[in-house]
Image: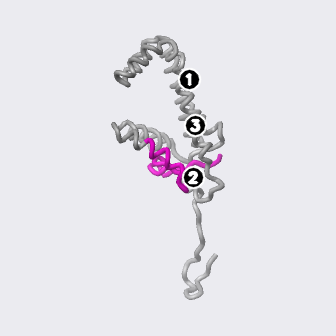
Amino acid sequence: MASNLGNQYAPPKSAVADVGEEGSQLASRIARLAAVTLDGLLGFIAFAPAYATNFDQIAQAANRNPWSVWVGLARTGGWFYFGALVAVIVLIVDLMLLARNGQTIGKKLLGIKVVRVDGSPVTLFRVFFLRYVCNTFLSLIPLLGSLYGLVDCLMIFGEKRRTIHDYIADTIVIKA
């Protein structure tokens, strides 16, 4: 603690560091990549039977119009509804985990979580809407969305290991 020799009435000064400034507490880049990969695989695996039963038609539809993939999946009938049910269950579990401790299923398995920059817990609104929904809408912008997605991913290699959606939501990812 530094003292003010010239002014005895000045408040004391001290160095304060945010949680994110200490490199040992931030989640590793590999852990973040593995967590998002696991979360993505959960969504894909739910629809894998629907893809497998109607792959040729879905692939042809995707060449014509990317949105028609969903129509092709819906034509698989029960497998599509099974995948949709699993996806809704995963979403509900993720929302409960995010509200409770800032984790998705992938983040929980890898022992990392999302917190505010000052180390306080995140709210469900902040973590779900600002980190995920806002990020999804930005990535849907034609042409610019792909560039945004690439830049967002590459920002993890910065010194603070924060992506664009981390800056938007004022969050960091730390070891749980």
**Real-space Cα separation, disc 1 to disc 2, in angstroms:** 34 Å
Residue 26, how many percent across, how many down?
A: 61, 52
Q: Secondary structure at mark 2?
A: loop
Residue 8, how many percent across, how many down?
A: 58, 85
Residue 136 shown left or right of residue 89 in the figure:
left
Which mark's residue is nearer the viewer, 2 or 3?
Answer: 3
Residue at the spot 65% in from the left edge and 39% down from the top edge: 110
Q: Which residues are magenta?
A: 149-176
Instruction: Give the residue at mark 1.
Output: 45
- The mark total stands at 3
Amino acid type at circle 2 is Ser
Q: Quadrant of the N terminus?
A: bottom right
Instruction: Please say whether residue 29 is one of the residues in the magenta stretch.
Output: no
Label placed on residue 104: 3
Q: Secondary structure at mark 3?
A: loop
Q: Nearer the viewer, residue 108 or 4?
A: 108
Residue 33, how many percent across, how many down?
A: 57, 40
Q: Nearer the viewer, residue 88 or 159?
A: 159
Residue 58 shown left or right of residue 82 in the figure:
left
Q: Tell me: residue 49, above or below residue 104.
A: above
- Asked if the residue under mark 3 is in contact with the one under mark 2, i.e. CB atoms within 8 Å, the reply is no
- Asked if the residue under mark 3 is in contact with the one under mark 1, i.e. CB atoms within 8 Å, the reply is no
Q: Nearer the viewer, residue 56 or 35?
A: 56
Residue at the spot 52% in from the left edge and 51% down from the top edge: 162
Label placed on residue 120: 2
